[in-house]
Amino acid sequence: MITIKDIAARLQVSPSTVGRALADDPRISAATKKKVTEVADEMGYVANLAARMMRGVSSNLVGLVLPDIRNSFYSTIAHALSKCVQSAGFQLTLSETEDDRMVELHHIRELASANVAGIIIVPTARPHRESVRLLKLSPHVQLIRRQAAIGDQFFGIDDTQAIFDATNHLIALGHQRIAYLGGTDELPTGAARLAGYQRAIETLPRNARPGPDLVRLGPPGSVDFGREAMGELLSAPMPPTAVVAGSVRITQGILEALMARRIAVPDQLSVVGFGDEVGFSWWGPGLTTIGLPVHDLATACGLWFVHQIRQNAAAGAPYASIATATMIHRGSTRALAGAPRERAAVSRSKSPA
């Protein structure tokens, strides 16, 4: 294996000069760094990560900790972040938690032991105290979900407004028995999305508001939950006339249930999904859904985080970037039969801040 001493002998300089050049030390001239890098590449030199760790030097790894890579919502995030950090000379390493706080702790411990340059995390509902402690020892940023205990540097989506707009769209079409299938309110995203639904429902006359029997909360990453919950609602004595989904995977479950029962959409049921998967545009009449700026959000997070790492801003000032979702109107929603043709939509001035 080629070592720093081999490179130094080839260039007839000291090993310390080579080491500093490879570490991008400002005391070494750009010309020397260039020459050292060229010879290192020519000789096939590979940095010894273990040795760097013993010296307390951060690696070029950026850890990404998220719930489920099978969810295209998160795979899009991982892809965008990988491209972003790679262009800056870092390498993304991926860890899945399946929303298990102990698995999350295990991954964070491993990343910390590898002296990662930083960690981007979609946290679980109740991160372990040790996870919080370890995260605070390294540059880190929360993505999609925000847990106050972890810190106040965050990139996310205005979940409350997104579900408010989706529910309000159905109210404007004359629907009142509007169901909501979303993630558990133990998660910050689940609570925020449920709040959007509830605030929209509160704009209806009190005697026309749907009851809690039309709300189903469960694992946001579970297609099975979405399918089973939708099946239960369809079998109820008074099924909903419309439904709003609160996650991508729950949307997929809802669509599976509707197809299995041959529900005519939107004649029998109006549907608003969450996210815009490739198949959503051609599913049935085309799915009206909440469009999420996932790729742009992840890219912005990656660029900002790389800058923070380079500025050695481990304990930087609070920072929050909140992206706005958009309604994508297709054919899966329509005015409720018998409802007034022109029902004024609730204005955005009444929407949650």
Image (cartoon, rainbow, N blue to C red):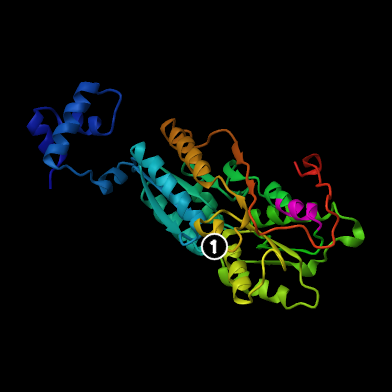
Magenta-colored span: 166-174
Residue 334 point in image, percent of width and height = 73, 58
Depth order, front residue of 174/1: 174
Please identify the dominant SS of the magenta region: helix
Asked whether, in this view, residue 38 is left or right of residue 335, the answer is: left
Depth order, front residue of 224/333: 333
Does the image show residue 155? Answer: yes
Q: Residue at x 49, y 54 (%)?
A: 74
Q: Which residue is drawn at 23% across and 46% down?
A: 48
- The amino acid beneath tag 1 is Asp
- Counting the numbered discs, the total is 1
Does the image show residue 128? Answer: no
Quadrant of the image occupied by residue 17:
top left
Q: Is residue 256 highlighted in magenta?
A: no
Quadrant of the image occupied by residue 205:
bottom right
Q: Is residue 29 above or below residue 146?
A: above
Residue occupied by mark 1: 99
Asked whether, in this view, residue 277 is left or right of residue 196, the answer is: left
Residue 21 point in image, percent of width and height = 23, 30
Q: For the C terminus, which image quadrant? A: top right
Residue 301 point in image, percent of width and height = 50, 40
